Structures are given as C-alpha cells and as structure tokens.
Amino acid sequence: MKNKTKLPGIFLGIVLVVMYLPILMVVLYSFNEGKLIASWKGFSLDWYVKLFQDEEIWEAVKNSLILGVLSCFAAAVLGTVGAVGMAKVKSRTKGPMEYISTLPIMIPEIILGMVFLTFFHLLNLPNGMVTLVIAHTAFCIPYIYMMVKARLVGLDKALEEAAKDLGATPLRTFFDITLPLILPAVASGCLLAFAMSWDDVIISIFVTGPKVTTLPIKIYTQMKTGVTPEINALCTVMLAVTILVLALAGLIRKRFAKRR
C-alpha cells in the first residue's frame, strides 16, 4: 500500500495563507470606514472617493509610469544589444565582462544610491526625472541582459548563417532573424525590469528632486504621518488592474494559439 501523507497539502496551505492573506487584508481594509488600517469601523467607499480626488497620489503614479516606461525602453535597447554583442565575443575577458555587467543587481541599493548621487553631483546634473531615468536604466539593464543571454544560448546559429548566405547584412539578419526569436525574452525582461523600477524606493530617494515624487516614495513618506486606508484603496485598484492585464494577456495568448 502506498504511504499517503498530508504534509504536502499542509505545506501548500501554509504557503498560500502566508502569500495571500495579507493581500486579502489590504483589500478588505480598503473598504474600512475608520482611519486606522488595523481597526475595522464599518463598510465605506469614502477612501476610494478620496483616492480619486487626491491629485498628489495620481501625480506620483504618473511619474512612476513615465519613469518605468522610459527606463525599461532604454534598458531593453542597451541590454539586448549588449547580450547579442557579447554572444559574438570570443575573448578571455568575456567572462569578467559578463560578471561586471550583472553587478548592479548584486550591489546593495543604498550603495548604488550613494554612487549615483555622487556621480550626478560631479556632472552637476540636478536631481529630477532625468537622473531617475539614468539610475533606473542602470539597474534594469542586467535583468534584460540575463534574459536575452539565456535565450541566445538556445538559438540555432544556422538560421543566422543561412540569412547571411542569402545576402542579408548583419543588421538585416538581426532584425529579421535574431530579434523575432529573442523578443519573448526581451518582453519578459522588460516586465521584470518595470516591476523593479516601479517598486524602487532606496535609489529613487537618493536621485530624485523636490519636484518629482514617485509612488513608492510618496507611500514611504506618508508612513511618517500614518498610512490611511487610502493607500489600501490604491493597492486594491493596482491589484485589479494587474489581474485585468494578466487576464487579457492570457486571452490574447489563447487566441494566437488557436490560430496556429
């Protein structure tokens, strides 16, 4: 007889509770009538009304979106070009160069923040959106670089060689053969980089200016005066948007799969 145990089910249940119970509590207390996020005073939608009337919050959301898109686009270009170029390099320095290119995700963020602050000061570059984009691009590049690098390992080099034999230039070969094949890896890296940019607090505090506030910094500064259920409402809206985007992506993927 097979020895059946409930340990896997118990372990899975504990993991699910630890992961999703806090999220459910955030959603629940976004409808709390009271000002305290840990004391239930009754059901209310007032915090959602205040959220959509709070211009500072939405300005911070807009800044975070602009920062995430710009930094991910720049990181996608640099990371993809770097990975493709490094794949063609045959030198003893290739290993150390690849290691150095991934250092930004290994160095503590507080050190990176201080480095960027000093660097921008030496350049006499005022802190603001420009410095934020440069800093976020720098630590987003390794995520896209590693994704594309892993994808390039599994590509058939004969495809590029066949394109070159047919008269295609290296640039034409890249755009017609290589780029379509590595595009899923680039997209995955961009999503991960965007999430890291959207979530960053430490580096952003060092390089942002008085006129530019991102959403994580806005929430962090509000913790000093007390977080209200308005932040819970914002998190709930963001969660709903994320679920909607994932559902649409799954639907589009299914439709493309049926067409094939």
Image (cartoon, rainbow, N blue to C red):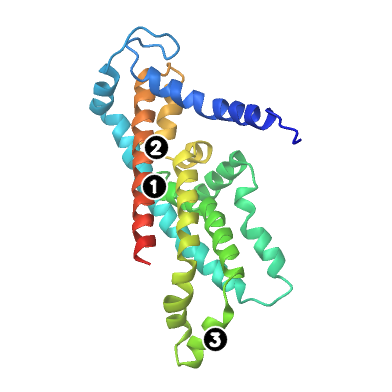
Instruction: Inspect the image, locate mark 2, and give the three-letter code of the amino acid beneath it.
Output: Thr
Mark 1 residue element = helix
**Position in image of residue 228 (x %, y %):** 38, 17
**Position in image of residue 160 (x %, y %):** 52, 82
| Residue behind mark 2 | 214
| Residue behind mark 3 | 161
- With 111 as the anchor, is 39 left or right in this view? left
Question: Where, by quadrant of the figure, is residue 94 drawn?
Answer: bottom right
Instruction: Inspect the image, locate mark 3, and give the three-letter code of the amino acid beneath it.
Output: Glu
Precedes in sequence: disc 2 or disc 3:
3
Q: Is residue 122 above or below residue 81?
A: above
Precedes in sequence: disc 2 or disc 1:
1
Dot 1 surroundings within 10 Å: few (below 14), some, or many (20 or more)? many
Q: Is residue 29 above or below residue 66?
A: above
Circles 2, 1 touching at the beta carbon (< 8 Å): yes
Precedes in sequence: disc 1 or disc 3:
1
Residue 67 image label: 1
- With 102 as the anchor, is 241 left or right in this view? left
Q: Residue at x 68, y 77 (%)?
A: 90
- With 180 as the anchor, is 8 left or right in this view? right
**For the C terminus, which image quadrant?**
bottom left
Could you say which is closer to the camera, residue 60 or residue 11?
A: 11
Question: Where, by quadrant of the figure, is residue 53 drawn?
Answer: top left
**Position in image of residue 112 (x %, y %):** 59, 45
Mark 2 residue element = loop
